[in-house]
């Protein structure tokens, strides 16, 4: 079981996807943006406790977890001390658009 202080690390493009989604929801309603951020943070906190929750979708250990109430999927890799968020993907995006991120230097 991972330590309770498990770190969360984002691929730069995944961080941008999260920020863009939050900004989009803010343009619709500040309250909706707040709910998105709270739901996302809650999902990451859940992964800190239960990193194997998501369905494995790639042989190197990439897992997918679907957000409730928002049309996003989180693709991540769980290590003993970190959750590495590979993508924050809208459900309408091509399902494997983020795969190139796994081949970048410093990635798994």
Image: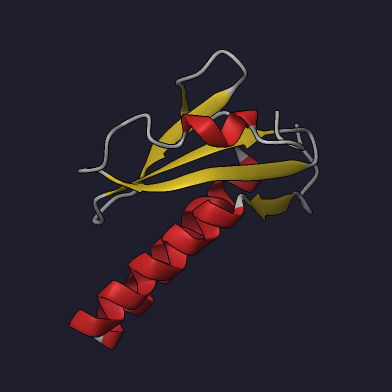
Count the labels in the image: 0
How far across and how far down the image is residue 97, in percent? 38, 35
Residue 51 in view, yes or no: no
Query: Left or right: 14 with respect to 102?
Result: left
Quadrant of the image occupied by residue 106: top right
Q: Which residue lies at the image location 63% right of the left edge and 28% below the top edge?
A: 103
Seen as rendered, the residue at the extreme bottom is 30
Quarter of the picture holding the C terminus? top right
How far across and how far down the image is residue 11, in percent? 61, 50
Q: Which residue lies at the image location 78% right of the left edge and 33% below the top edge?
A: 80
Query: Left or right: 22 with respect to 44?
Result: left
Determine whether 52 is above or below 69 in the image. above
Determine whether 70 is above or below 57 in the image. below
How far across and how far down the image is residue 47, in percent? 58, 44
Quadrant of the image occupied by residue 77: top right
Q: Which residue occupies the foreground of this view, 30 or 11?
A: 11
Q: Which residue lies at the image location 29% right of the left edge and 86% below the top edge?
A: 30
Q: Which residue lies at the image location 27% right of the left edge and 74% below the top edge?
A: 25
Quarter of the picture holding the N terminus? top right
Quadrant of the image occupied by residue 107: top right
Query: Left or right: 100 with respect to 102?
Result: left
How far across and how far down the image is residue 50, in percent? 60, 37
Seen as rendered, the residue at the extreme top is 59
Q: Which residue occupies the foreground of this view, 83 or 51?
A: 83
């Amino acid at each position: 079981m991972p330590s309770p202080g498990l770190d969360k690390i984002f691929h730069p493009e995944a961080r941008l996807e999260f920020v863009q989604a939050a900004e989009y929801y803010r343009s619709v309603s500040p309250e909706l943006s707040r709910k998105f951020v709270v739901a996302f943070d809650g999902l990451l906190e859940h992964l800190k406790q239960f990193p194997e929750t998501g369905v494995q979708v790639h042989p190197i250990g990439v897992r997918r977890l679907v957000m409730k109430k928002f049309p996003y999927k989180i693709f991540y890799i769980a290590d003993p001390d970190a959750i590495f968020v590979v993508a924050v993907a809208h459900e309408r995006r091509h399902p494997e658009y983020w795969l190139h991120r796994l081949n970048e230097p410093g990635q798994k």
